[in-house]
Image (tube, coloured by chain):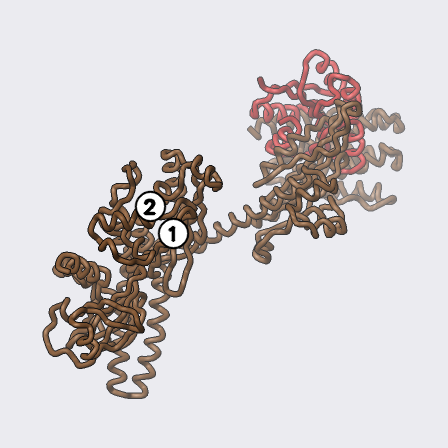
Chain colours: A red, B brown
Amino acid sequence: MGKTIMTVDDSTSVRQMVSFTLKGAGYEVIEAIDGKDALSKLEKNPVNMVITDLNMPNLDGIGLIKQIRANAAYRFLPIIMLTTESQESKKQEGKQAGATGWIIKPFKPEQLIAVVKRVLG
Amino acid sequence: MTNTYKDTYKEEANEQLIELEATLLELEDTPDDAELIGRAFRAMHTIKGSGAMFGFDDIAGFTHEIETVYDKVRDGSLKVTNELINLTLMAKDHIKSMLDETPQDKDTFTQSSAEIVAAFKRLSSKEEPSISPRMPSSFEQASSSQTEGENITYRIRFKPSHDIFLTGTNPILLLDEISSLGESKIIAQLDDIPTLDNINAENIYIYWDIILTTDRGINAIKDVFIFVEDFCDLSINIIDSDKASGEHDEYKKIGEILVEKGDIKKEDLQKVLTEKKYLGEILVDKGLVTPDKVESALVEQEHIRKERDRLRSKEEIQTSIKVPADKLDMLVNLVGELVTVQARLTQTASDYNMAELNAIAEEVERLTGELRDTTLNIRMLPIGTTFGRFKRLVRDLSHELGKEIELTTEGADTELDKTVIEKLNDPLVHLIRNSIDHGIEPPDVRKAQGKPKTGNIHLSAVHSGGNVIIRIKDDGKGLDKDAILAKAIEKGLVAHNAELSEKEVFSFIFHPGFSTAKEVTSVSGRGVGMDVVKKAIDMLRGTIDIESIRGKGTTITVTLPLTLAIVEGLLVTIDKNYFVLPLSIVEECVELTQKDVEKAHGKNIACIRDELVPYIRLRNEFGISGERPPIEQIVVTGRNGEKVGFVVDSVIGEHQTVIKNLGKFYKDVEGISGATILGDGNIALIVDVPKITRNVELVEAVFG
């Protein structure tokens, strides 16, 4: 059985690209358009990993990570944040919230796969 | 595929732009609405972020500038003004036209982009200079470009913090990724694991030492750990590299590694070093360091050694070329011809006695000598390949015979002429089989005699002057001198009351059909073997020698010339004919006067320093007529402890000889193993000493 990854991004194109890349590598993908959407979908569908953007309406990436970690079932879930911010502060904030790692946009499909392999296997 | 993404992006960006426009217009009315500012910011952020991903670098770069300004608006350091809104709307229109861009418009766009960006900067630059327009170029992990090529070995200690699981990290995956970078060894360190009641099941207590050899550079390693750099103790040290490995042949001692890694104090090490034991054991015994740490250091040592070996063998491959053996043989033949011609040149030059010609001849002589040595060297191969095959032989045979035998080898890199190595294989197989079958006792017998259960056969090769000495030494029961002698008497090889030295007795086993084995096994005992071995070794112009101590073992020593193509010979004459005797077996030359012959009462025996040496008259053997000189010469040869003299008219001296085959017609001529051309064009025949000796022995046995 393939592992399931949730991609959370308000940008359709990014979601599409992430989704297509991951499916190509044999993963199941669930898409969510923002933090709120992600949380509600997480309740219904168990996932093995979350890839989330940081800047999103309704509930942003940092908030999403905090809420995921608060859920006992997802305490050890690998979470990767997508960010254009290479600044330490944003990264640090995400890490403190409990992110496993990050990918800086723009990225290539291979880079995405490499990171997924690193944290999910 | 990319095009689909591009279209999706364009669609999405257009939506974002419409949203942006609406937001900006609202913002114009309520300039302090943080919610609206955030929305505008996000719209631009998405356009920028996705734009960079799908190849719209110009849009991404441009939007980045505006976003930077809006970042300031967001944190309140810049006020929303009409001017800003106007400028932003202009920018929005610009992005829109960039989205619909056709290639030829590019320059215009670049220019207007620059103008708008400049305007934004003027607006905000009152506070500070802007950030470089360059996008955070690419993915950090991959951008850390590696200096590829050189293999460097790193020692990595990865010690995750206890609660690393809470970040969703799986350390095993990181270790897997590290392993994928190159040749690696991973040693888990367990000494931090607390007692059971203190263990928190959600924590990690293990840490790892990793030895990694990779050409990807240190950044590739750091990349693997980049997500966890705040959640672990990570140390990466270079411990070896391709370049460094040439400097010291041996890698660091285990103690040095431990001290370097801070696992143990230097003083403690010094203290312990005064005792003699395996260092690792001592350190563990003393509680200075845990077994894991020692193991880790040992693995590191091992790893580096292996890597260096691999490197060495790789270098060897790179610096060698394959050449068909027959090409080499041709080269050797040509060099042989050249040596012959050179000898003639030297001879002729000395005949004319011209200083100038002599100088040239000497120079040619020197060069030819070097060329000859180099050429012969090319054909030299390490004997190790043959050794390797014997391991299997010993394993299989000892298994079959229910014995436990280990084969140890030494000097596998000893070089020998290729043809010699090829012809050496069969005799060595015979000798090793003998050791396995007759030499080494079954395990229970060995045990009863207080010997280790496992027998040992030691195979060694070593250079000695122009020869290679190969020894096969076993720790078996040794040769039974009495049994051999009894058998020899039984076979009529020797008188029953003869007094023989140990060596002479042992040499009986080289007689055809000689076996003392009571039963014939599949391996040996039929009495074929040793005589074949001897013949083969003779063919190689080598000698074979036996030493044996009853109950302790047997050592068989085979001495071989380095090469078959050239023989160091002793040049002698009989009447007007030239002969060459292999110098390797010549022990001395003594005169034989008419008086000596008379004293021997018709027997072909000379008394040399109170030792009786039988001799053979080569003149008779080869049927050469003519008058014998009053004083002849005996060339005394020694083989297998037996001395035999060869009587010739005169001895000319040492002569380095390139061996020529006699050709088809003469291949069956007994007593001659080849020929060579002398400097003056004369031909000298090379005496087949073993053959002649054997022939004479046979004749003696029959008629004696």
State the mark number for residue B429.
Answer: 2
Looking at the image, residue B431 sits to the left or right of residue A37; the answer is left
Q: Residue at x 24, y 85 (%)?
A: B351
Q: Residue B536: image x %, image y %?
A: 27, 53
Residue A34 versus residue B193 in the image, above or below: above
Residue extending farthest left: B625
Looking at the image, residue B687 sits to the left or right of residue A41; the answer is left
Q: Residue B327: image x %, image y %?
A: 29, 57
Residue B625's image quarter?
bottom left
**Any part of residue B286 in sight:** yes
Chain letter of the residue beneath label 1 in the structure image? B
Residue extending farthest front: B497
For the residue marked with disc 1, what is the amino acid? Ser
As helix, strand or loop, the secondary structure at mark 1 comes to: strand
As helix, strand or loop, the secondary structure at mark 2 comes to: helix
- In the image shown, does B267 or B3 lie closer to the viewer? B267
State the mark number for residue B548.
Answer: 1
For the residue marked with disc 2, what is the amino acid? Val
Q: Residue at x 68, y 38 (%)?
A: B291
Q: Residue B259: image x %, image y %?
A: 72, 48
Q: Residue at x 36, y 75 (%)?
A: B366
Query: Which quadrant is home to the N terminus of chain B?
Result: top right
Chain letter of the residue beneath label 2 in the structure image? B
Residue B101's image quarter?
top right
State the mark number for residue A54.
Answer: none
**Any part of residue B144 in sight:** no
